[in-house]
Amino acid sequence: MSEKVDHSKFFILFGSLLLILVIISISTGSVYISPVEILNLISSSNESDSAFKTIVFSYRLPKMLTALFAGSALGFAGLQMQTLFRNPLAGPFVLGISSGASLGVAILVLSGIGLNGLFASYGMATASIIGSSSVLAIILLVSFNIKDSMSLLLIGIMFGAFTSAVVSVLQYFSSAEDIQSYLFWTFGATGNLTWSELRVFIPLILLGIALGYSQIKQLNVLLLGEYYAKSMGLKILNTRIILVLSTSILAGIVTAFCGPIAFIGLAIPHFSRLIHKTSHHKVLVPSVLLIGACALLLCDIIAQLPGLDLILPINAITSLFGAPIVIWLIIRRKNITRTFG
């Protein structure tokens, strides 16, 4: 009973933290808007507040929602991959989904197409989705003929290496301006989505989470190893396909709309296991969703540099905080692989 109370205290604590971070995210930026003013803006129709309303409703609210859902998606995707492959270094991009998305954007931007007309607004997201979906299709086809998950992991890593090589060749033959545009995309950003794009982004994230959540029992069984899972009647191939599809949707959509965001998917599952001292996914799944949202919101607030006109790359902030956290977790746990048997 005491263990359940501890978990509930954690969810109350991080739920409160999430609410505080949401308020700070909407309030801070180059112009500070107090929470009281934000409430007045929501309830008021006064045209004199139109400038602040534009800032809050056209920029800060979409940015906050993007960070919240992207953080949850990456945390959950990382948990699924670490459990499926029973590998503490697995993350949401381990299957080459991010590399496929990067290749799609590289082909578009480094050819100069993505800088003009309609493509300037929607081209990068479309190219990223096409690239990640292509890799997903190949991975799913391969998974039918692969008996163990470790072979699938290795194939995913090889896909990533191949697409990175193609991107390097494209960069070599591209102009400095196109390379700079592609580089800016790789920095990651949460402030580029409009409300119309969020209507696509959020439902797809929820779809990916729902697919993964349907496999909670299977995830717990996979911790015992694939051979033991088969002896218990688990259909490994079906479970693997659903988990790969869920992770690909989550990682692919986040990469498409926000760019590649590092370390959230790798660090958050380990942080959650350390806090709860359990590997049970009925606890870990809501935990990584909550902590992932908090982590990316916090990084986004820091990247915003409140009070200044500068905005740091979100990828730089997540790496600056994520790398030391992973190192600390490894030192603290001494043997991080024991979680996976």
Image: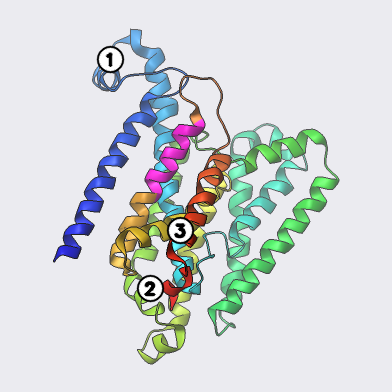
Residue 301 is situated, as x and y percent measured from the top left of the image, at 44, 33
Q: State the separation of the CA atoms marked 3 and 1.
A: 50 Å
Q: State the separation of the CA atoms marked 2 and 1.
A: 49 Å
Give the image quarter of residue 176: top right
Instruction: Determine which residue is flagged by label 1.
Output: 45
Instruction: Report the amino acid beneath label 2.
Output: Leu
Instruction: Report the amino acid beneath label 1.
Output: Ser
Label the magenta part by its dominant secondary structure.
Answer: helix
Q: State the separation of the CA atoms marked 2 and 3.
A: 22 Å
Instruction: Identify the mark at residue 219; answer none if there is no mark.
Output: 2
Viewer-proximal residue, 68 or 291? 291
| Secondary-structure class at tag 2 | helix
Give the image quarter of residue 118: top right
- Nearest to viewer (mark 2 / mark 3): 3
46 in the magenta segment: no
Q: Which residues are magenta?
A: 292-303
Residue 66 visible:
no
Residue projecting furthest to the bottom = 231
Q: Is residue 152 left or right of residue 295?
A: right
Identified at 73% across, 35% down, the residue is 180
| Secondary-structure class at tag 3 | helix
Up the image or down, 186 lies above or below 95; here it is above
Tag 2 and tag 1, C-beta contact below 8 Å: no
299 in the magenta segment: yes
Instruction: Report the amino acid beneath label 3.
Output: Leu
Which image quarter holds the C terminus?
A: bottom left
Instruction: Identify the mark at residue 264; answer none if there is no mark.
Output: none
First in residue order: circle 2 vs circle 3: 2
Instruction: Determine which residue is flagged by label 3.
Output: 329
Give the image quarter of residue 189: top right
Specify few, some or many for label 3: CA neighbours under 10 Å numbering under 14, 14-19, or 20 or more. some
